[in-house]
C-alpha cells in the first residue's frame, strides 16, 4: 500500500464519474442521516447479474476530507456499519474459534507502511482482542523519532489462521549494503518482517526478516528505483523500500509471502528458508508462460495446493507511483508447476473491459462461492464482481479517482447485533403536520421493522428501509417522549433510549 500523492492529477479512465472539473466537484457525494452524525461515501452500485450473498467490508479513506473508517455496506449501496474515524487498513471479516469476527489494522501511517495494532471485533462490534507487537521490547527502529506509538504492526495484513493465530507484517528500519544496486554501502532499508502471533496471549510464535535472508531474497530483484518513492536509502529517514511485503498466508507449516517492490511471491519454511521464489518478471525459480507476467501485486493466496502444483490468485496492479499508469490492472490466477517443467501457466485473467482500471496501489482479489470473484482496486475506488464464467455482474464506485481509496474489500456473510442502542430523532410537524421519526441502528443487519412508541402506546410499525428508516406518524407533539423498538432479527425487542420529540430537529 502506498499513499496517493495529492498532487497526482492523472485520471486513468474517462468515466463520467471521474470528470471532476474543479476542486469542489472533486468532493464525492456523501450520505448523511438525521438520527446519526455518521457521514459515509455514496456507494454507487450497478448490477448486471446475480451477485453472491454477503455484505461488502472495506475501509474507505476520504483523501480530500482527511477521514477514514472501517465500514460495511449492503449490495444496494446502503451503509450497514461504520466505526470511528481514524487510520485503518487490512480490514478482513474472518472466523476466529468458530465465530465470525472483523479484524483490522489501526494506528500511525507512514509513506506506504505504518505502526499500529490489529483490533478484532465480535459481531456486537466490541473489541475482543487487540494484537500488538511491543516496539521497544522487540527493538524496532522506525522513521518516526521519537516514537509516539507502542505497537509496531504494519498496515498490510491481518490474516487469522485456523488455530487462532494471526499473520501480520512489520517494518523495521535497518542498515544494509546497497552498493550492488548503486546505493550507499552504509545504506538504510525498510526491512520486511513476517510474524505469526497467538491472538489469545499476544505471544510471538514466528518471526521472519527478509534482510536476514537476503541471499534468497536478493536486492537485485527489487523493481522500485533507488530514487523513486521507495526511499533513496541514504539515511534512516528515507530507507529504501526493500522488500515491501503486503500479504501473508499460511498453508500447512509454510508461509506464502507477497513482496510488492520485488514483484515476487516467496514460500517460506518454518526455519526461514525460502522453499521457492516466483518472480513476476523473471520467473525466479520458474519459467513464465504466456500472459503470466505480474508486478507490484496485492493479496496473493493459494486457490489449491498439492506437492506437484499450486494455483495462486492475486490482484495484479502492474502499476506504481513511479511507473505511471499504463498497464491494465487485472485479477490473475496462475498454475505453478513445482516440479519437472517448473512452468507457470495462465488459468484466468479478469478485468472490466468497459471500464478498465490502472490501479496505482492496493487492492484485493477474493474467490467467492460458486466460482464468483470479488475484486477491489485499492487506490481506484471501484469494486467488481464476476460470475463463474468471468462475466461482470456488479460494479460499485464509492469515490472519484484520487479522492477515495480502500486497501481491500471482501464480501462476507454477517449478522451484526450492536451492543449500542438504536438512534432516534422525532420531529413533529416536519411532514405536512405529521411527525417524522428517523431511526437507525449502526451495525444491525437483520432488523425487519421498527415500532415507534409515544408514551406507552405504539404509534406505528414500519418496515425497515436501509440504514435510516423514516416513520411518519400522527399524534406526537413537541415534548412527548418517543422510543423505538427493533422487530425481527438477532436484536429483536431492543429499544432506544427515550428521546423528546422536537429536540434536535
Ligand atoms: C452511478 O453509476 C452509473 C453507472 O455507471 C452512472 O450512470 C451514474 O451517473 C452514477 N451516479 C452517480 C451519482 O455518480
Ligand atoms: C494517523 O496517522 C497520522 C500520521 O500519518 C498520525 O499523525 C495520526 O495521529 C494517526 N491517527 C490516529 C488516530 O492514530
Ligand atoms: C462481544 O463482546 C462483548 C465484550 O466482551 C460482549 O459483551 C458481547 O456479548 C459479545 N457479543 C457477542 C455476540 O458475543
Ligand atoms: C531492527 O533493526 C535493528 C538494527 O539493525 C536491530 O537491532 C533490531 O533487532 C531490529 N528489530 C527487529 C524487530 O527486527
Ligand atoms: C536524509 O536524506 C534526505 C534526502 O537526501 C535529506 O533531505 C535529509 O535532510 C536527510 N536527513 C538527515 C537527518 O540527514
Ligand atoms: C529448513 O527447511 C527446509 C525445508 O524444509 C529444509 O530443506 C532445510 O534443510 C532446512 N534448513 C535447516 C538449516 O534446517
Ligand atoms: C456459465 O457458462 C455455462 C456453460 O456455458 C452455462 O451453462 C452457465 O449458465 C453460465 N453461467 C452464467 C451465470 O451465465
Image (cartoon, grey):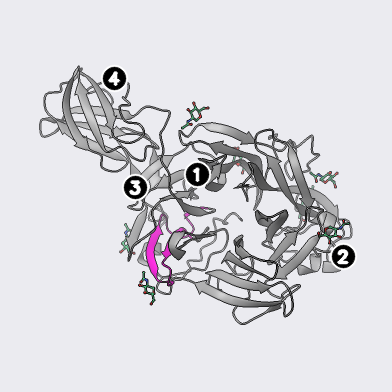
Q: Position of residue 300 (x, y in %)?
A: 61, 61
Closer to the N terminus: mark 3 or mark 2?
Answer: 3
**Viewer-closest of 254 and 193:** 254
As for residue 273 lying within the magenta part, the answer is no
Q: Which mark is residue 78?
A: 3
**Residue designated by label 1:** 68
Under circle 4, the secondary element is: loop
**Disc 1 from disc 3: Cα separation:** 17 Å
Closer to the N terminus: mark 2 or mark 4?
Answer: 2
Front disc: 1 or 3: 3
**Disc 3 from disc 2: Cα separation:** 53 Å
The answer to whether the residues at label 1 and label 4 have Cβ atoms under 8 Å apart is no
**Viewer-closest of 1 and 55:** 55
**Disc 2 from disc 4: Cα separation:** 69 Å
Give the left or right position of residue 224, taking residue 470 as reference: right
The image quadrant where one finds the C terminus is: top left
Q: Position of residue 427 (x, y in %)?
A: 21, 28
The answer to whether the residues at label 1 and label 2 have Cβ atoms under 8 Å apart is no
The image quadrant where one finds the N terminus is: bottom right
**Disc 1 from disc 4: Cα separation:** 31 Å
Q: Residue at x 72, y 46 (%)?
A: 195
**Mark 3 vs ligand 1: CB below 8 Å:** no
**Residue designated by label 4:** 498
Q: Residues within 10 Å of mark 2 (few under 14, many from 20)?
A: few
Q: Residues within 10 Å of mark 4 (few under 14, many from 20)?
A: some
Front disc: 3 or 2: 3
**Residue designated by label 2:** 179
Closer to the N terminus: mark 3 or mark 4?
Answer: 3
Give the left or right position of residue 463, taking residue 71 as reference: left
Highlighted range, magenta: 380-406
Give the left or right position of residue 156, taking residue 493 as reference: right
Amino acid at each position: 500500500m502506498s499513499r496517493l500523492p495529492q498532487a497526482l492529477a492523472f485520471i486513468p479512465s474517462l468515466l463520467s464519474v471521474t470528470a471532476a472539473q474543479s476542486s469542489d466537484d472533486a468532493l464525492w457525494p456523501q450520505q448523511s442521516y438525521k438520527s446519526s452524525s455518521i457521514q459515509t461515501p455514496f456507494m454507487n452500485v450497478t448490477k448486471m447479474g446475480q451477485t453472491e450473498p454477503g455484505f461488502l467490508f472495506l475501509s474507505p479513506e476520504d483523501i480530500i476530507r482527511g477521514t477514514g473508517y472501517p465500514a460495511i455496506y449492503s449490495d444496494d449501496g446502503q451503509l450497514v456499519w461504520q466505526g470511528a474515524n481514524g487510520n485503518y487498513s487490512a480490514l478482513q471479516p474472518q472466523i476466529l474459534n468458530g465465530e465470525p469476527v472483523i479484524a483490522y489494522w489501526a494506528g500511525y501511517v507512514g509513506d506506504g507502511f505504518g505502526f499500529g495494532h490489529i483490533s478484532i471485533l465480535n459481531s456486537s462490534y466490541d473489541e475482543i482482542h487487540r494484537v500488538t507487537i511491543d516496539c521497544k521490547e522487540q527493538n524496532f527502529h522506525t522513521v518516526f523519532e521519537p516514537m509516539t506509538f507502542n505497537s509496531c504492526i504494519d498496515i498490510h495484513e491481518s490474516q487469522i489462521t485456523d488455530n487462532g493465530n494471526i499473520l501480520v507484517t512489520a517494518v523495521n528500519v535497518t542498515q544494509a549494503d546497497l552498493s550492488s544496486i548503486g546505493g550507499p554501502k552504509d545504506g538504510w532499508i525498510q526491512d520486511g518482517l513476517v510474524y505469526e502471533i497467538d491472538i489469545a496471549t499476544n505471544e510471538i510464535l514466528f518471526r521472519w526478516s527478509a534482510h536476514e535472508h537476503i541471499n534468497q531474497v536478493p536486492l537485485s530483484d527489487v523493481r522500485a528505483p533507488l530514487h523513486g518513492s521507495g526511499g533513496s536509502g541514504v539515511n534512516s529517514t528515507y530507507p529504501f523500500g526493500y522488500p515491501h511485503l503486503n500479504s501473508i498466508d499460511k498453508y500447512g507449516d509454510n508461509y506464502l509471502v507477497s513482496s510488492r517492490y520485488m514483484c515476487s511471491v516467496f514460500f517460506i519454511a518454518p526455519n526461514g528458508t525460502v522453499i521457492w521464489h516466483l518472480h513476476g518478471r523473471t520467473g525466479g525459480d520458474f519459467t513464465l508462460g504466456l500472459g503470466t507476467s505480474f508486478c507490484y501485486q496485492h493479496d496473493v493466496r493459494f486457490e489449491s495446493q498439492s506437492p506437484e502444483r499450486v494455483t495462486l490468485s492475486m490482484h495484479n496492479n502492474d502499476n506504481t507511483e513511479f511507473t505511471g499508469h499504463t498497464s491494465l490492472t487485472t485479477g490473475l490466477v496462475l498454475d505453478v508447476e513445482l516440479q519437472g517443467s517448473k512452468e507457470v501457466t495462465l488459468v484466468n485473467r479478469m478485468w472490466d473491459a468497459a471500464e478498465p482500471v490502472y490501479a496505482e496501489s492496493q487492492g484485493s482479489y477474493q474467490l467467492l462461492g460458486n466460482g464468483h470473484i470479488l475484486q477491489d482496486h485499492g487506490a481506484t475506488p471501484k469494486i467488481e464482481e464476476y460470475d463463474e464464467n468471468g462475466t461482470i455482474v456488479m460494479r460499485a464506485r464509492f469515490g472519484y479517482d484520487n479522492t477515495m481509496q480502500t486497501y481491500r474489500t471482501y464480501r462476507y456473510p454477517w449478522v451484526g447485533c450492536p451492543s449500542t442502542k438504536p438512534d432516534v430523532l422525532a420531529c413533529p410537524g416536519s411532514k405536512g403536520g405529521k411527525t417524522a421519526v428517523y431511526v437507525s441502528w449502526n451495525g444491525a443487519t437483520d432488523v425487519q421493522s421498527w415500532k415507534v412508541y409515544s408514551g406507552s402506546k405504539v404509534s406505528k410499525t414500519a418496515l425497515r428501509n436501509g440504514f435510516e428508516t423514516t416513520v411518519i406518524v400522527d399524534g406526537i407533539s413537541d415534548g412527548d417522549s418517543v422510543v423505538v423498538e427493533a422487530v425481527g432479527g438477532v436484536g429483536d425487542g431492543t429499544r432506544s433510549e427515550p428521546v423528546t420529540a422536537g429536540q434536535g430537529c
